[in-house]
Amino acid sequence: MKRLATAICIALSFALAAQAQVKELNVSKRFNWGIRLGVNAPLVDIRHMSLDGNQIDESNSESSLGLTGSFIGRYNFKRHYIQLEVGMHQSHTRLYNPDYGLSKINTSAYAVDVPVLYGYNITKHGPFLMNLFAGPRVSYICDETSHIDVNGTTSRNLVYDDKPNSFSFYAVGGLSTTIGHLYIDFRYAYCIGNSKDQSFKIDLDDSQVGQVKLSRAVNELSISIGYLW
């Protein structure tokens, strides 16, 4: 992921240099289109977790950077715009609680995102635009896999009691800027809720199997760059 972040910074530097020769984005026309690509940092919020019906408190979680990207359609009216996006993101999270015999559970998920954002151009100076935006987002988890570490050297896949596919509902807010046609945004997505919780079984020891039920939210902080025309 460090190489990915370095590559994005290099690409951003070249794009900024190239923009000096590119005319400003025409926001007076009715529609702008674009693409964006970036990285997200998942922030795990464990709202409820139980083992065999007994609530587990203060479980630990970690995460690592994932990719995010989308196609953009923007409808302009005066200093305002409505931005519809369709894209995907991936997230990588880890959960563990050694006090209850839970080894590290690693989860990778891929989701389809559909945000509808309202934006306002707070400043415009030549080719430079700065916008505030906010709105709802619906995400559908189309692929999720989890595996649990065994003895720190091997791992095995977890089997869910039900398919992990589910919808998540978010409130999104952030700040974006355009320099010419270059688009950069910073956004935070807060998970309001999920359509269903996770449920799976794990081996606590050689002779005992535990039923885990997990209600969690994965909030996201992301940065992306793109191009509008």
Image: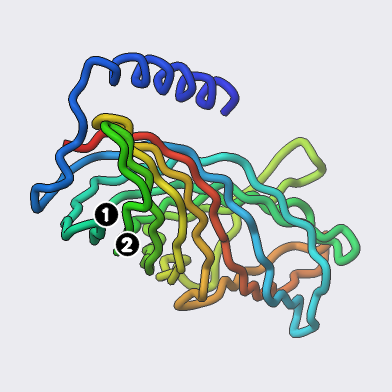
Mark 2 to mark 1 CA distance (whole Å): 8 Å
Counting residues from the start of the chain, the first of labels 2 and 1 encountered is 1
* Quadrant placement of the C terminus: top left
Q: Residue furthest right?
A: 99
Q: Do the CB atoms of the residues marked 2 and 1 lie less than 8 Å apart?
A: yes
In the image: residue 229, left or right of residue 103: left
Regarding mark 2 in the picture, which secondary structure is present there?
Answer: strand
How many discs appear?
Answer: 2
Name above or below for residue 7 compared with residue 123. Answer: above
- The residue identified by callout 1 is 85
Residue farthest to the left?
29
**Mark drawn on residue 117:** 2
Q: Which amino acid does label 2 sit on?
A: Leu
- Labels 2, 1: front one: 2
Looking at the picture, how far across and down is residue 40, in whole percent?
51, 44
Q: Quadrant of residue 81?
A: bottom left
Q: In percent of the image, x 38 and y 63: which residue is there? A: 139
Report the residue at 55% width, 75% height from top: 197
